[in-house]
């Protein structure tokens, strides 16, 4: 009995779900994101062997390529790859493709710089405040003084 109830609920959900997806506008997004599962069918096997879709942002498909040689090659094939992708879709279309190289895990992270705080001399602060006094808008003037203060107070150490 319990299995029948569950099966009945699943059938009702299966009947309702396509309408909900369509009414909410999610159908087009689901179609776009199907490219991740269908990549090998959408592009030729050579491209799919050396490049994989990463993400879709504002109609632009980001594709990670194996190396810089393939990046260059796919730049030349960009129009034909884009056409293959858009021919695959029924509703939504990809407006652009960006090819990127993988982020190497062995790559050194960017060097972090330590910052130390050293307040600027009070006379310099006073002099700058006098120069900024000609700015009529108080919020702008205060923001400029704070910016100047921080630019002088934060000292980057190597």
Image (cartoon, rainbow, N blue to C red):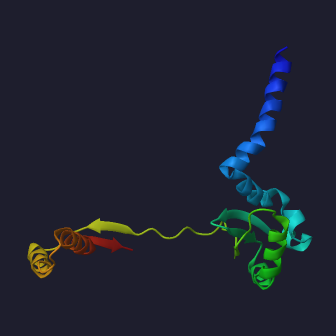
Identify which residue is drawn at 81% across, 23% down: 6
Q: In this view, does 113 lie to the left or right of 57?
A: left
Q: Which of 124 and 18 is in front in this view?
A: 18
Q: Which of 23 and 52 is in front in this view?
A: 23
User: Looking at the image, is 72 positioned above or below residue 55?
Assistant: below
Q: Is residue 55 left or right of residue 153?
A: right
- In the picture, the quarter occupied by the C terminus is bottom left
Residue 106 x, y percent position in the rendering = 65, 66
Q: Quadrant of residue 116?
A: bottom left
- In the picture, the quarter occupied by the N terminus is top right
Residue 88 x, y percent position in the rendering = 84, 66
Identify which residue is drawn at 10% across, 72% down: 122
Q: In which quarter of the image is residue 40?
A: bottom right
User: Looking at the image, is 78 positioned above or below residue 107?
Assistant: below
Q: How many labels does the image show?
A: 0
State whether residue 50 appears in this view: no
Residue 102 x, y percent position in the rendering = 70, 69
Identify which residue is drawn at 81% across, 37% down: 15
Q: In this view, does 77 lie to the left or right of 110?
A: right
């Amino acid at each position: 009995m319990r299995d029948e109830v569950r099966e009945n609920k699943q059938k009702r959900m299966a009947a309702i779900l396509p309408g909900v997806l369509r009414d909410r506008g999610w159908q087009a997004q689901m179609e776009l994101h199907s490219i991740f599962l269908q990549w090998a069918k959408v592009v030729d096997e050579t491209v799919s062997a050396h490049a994989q879709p990463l993400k879709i942002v504002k109609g632009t498909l980001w594709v990670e390529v194996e190396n810089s040689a393939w990046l260059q090659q796919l730049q030349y094939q960009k129009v034909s790859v884009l056409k293959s992708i858009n021919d695959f879709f029924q509703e939504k279309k990809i407006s652009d493709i960006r090819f990127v190289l993988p982020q190497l895990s062995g790559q050194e992270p960017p060097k972090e710089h330590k910052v130390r705080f050293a307040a600027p001399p009070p006379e310099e602060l006073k002099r700058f405040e006098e120069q900024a006094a000609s700015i009529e808008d108080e919020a702008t003037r205060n923001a400029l003084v704070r910016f100047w203060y921080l630019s002088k107070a934060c000292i980057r150490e190597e």
